[in-house]
Image (cartoon, helix red, strand yellow):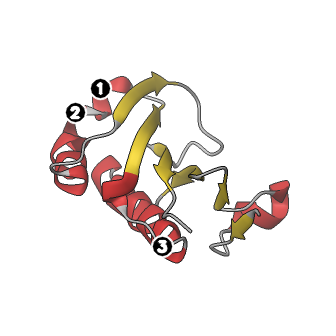
Amino acid sequence: MVQRIYSGGEFEAKIGYCRAVVAGGFIHVAGTVGQGDTVTEQCSAALATIDAALKEAGASLADVVRVNYYLPDRAEFEPCWPILSEAFGANPPAATMIETGLIDPKYRIEIEVTALAPAA
């Protein structure tokens, strides 16, 4: 069985995707941007959206096993480290950071995660 989770974000309908898909024992959360003027505000907001999708699937940030960070400026990654460390705490996932362009220049960070789905 596949479960699709929508957050109502503007790009879901425009592009044709959902926030997360629960399938094969995993929760795959789409790349998520957040609102705010600074990279740290956007990082916190993106994590809140991701956390909400995980909760809807019956999981939490503690269940994340893989995370990818995408930033247009790698120098802006370090200010996010305390936020990420607090979010994942004692359960840090495997992680990758990639410097790349994002869908809109106003976005400073995009976060994508894979988490373990709860046992049925």
Farthest front residue?
A: 120
Badge number at residue 58? 3
**Mark 1 and 2 residues: CB-CB less than 8 Å, in contact?**
yes
* Cα distance in 3D space between marks 1 and 3: 34 Å
* Residue underneath mark 2: 78
Q: Residues within 10 Å of mark 1 (few under 14, many from 20)?
A: few
* Cα distance in 3D space between marks 2 and 3: 30 Å
- Going by the numbered disc 2, the residue's amino acid type is Glu
- Going by the numbered disc 1, the residue's amino acid type is Ala
**In the image, is residue 105 above or below residue 3?**
above
**Mark positioned earlier in the residue sequence (2 or 3):** 3
**Mark 2 and 3 residues: CB-CB less than 8 Å, in contact?**
no
Q: State the residue in front, 68 or 22.
A: 22
- Going by the numbered disc 3, the residue's amino acid type is Gly
How far from the left and from the top, in percent, is residue 36? Answer: 40, 62
* Residue underneath mark 1: 75
Residue 37 shows up from this direction: no
Which of the two discs, 1 and 3, sits closer to the camera? 3
Q: Which residue is found at the position 43% from the left and 38% from the top?
A: 66
Label count reads 3
**Mark positioned earlier in the residue sequence (1 or 3):** 3
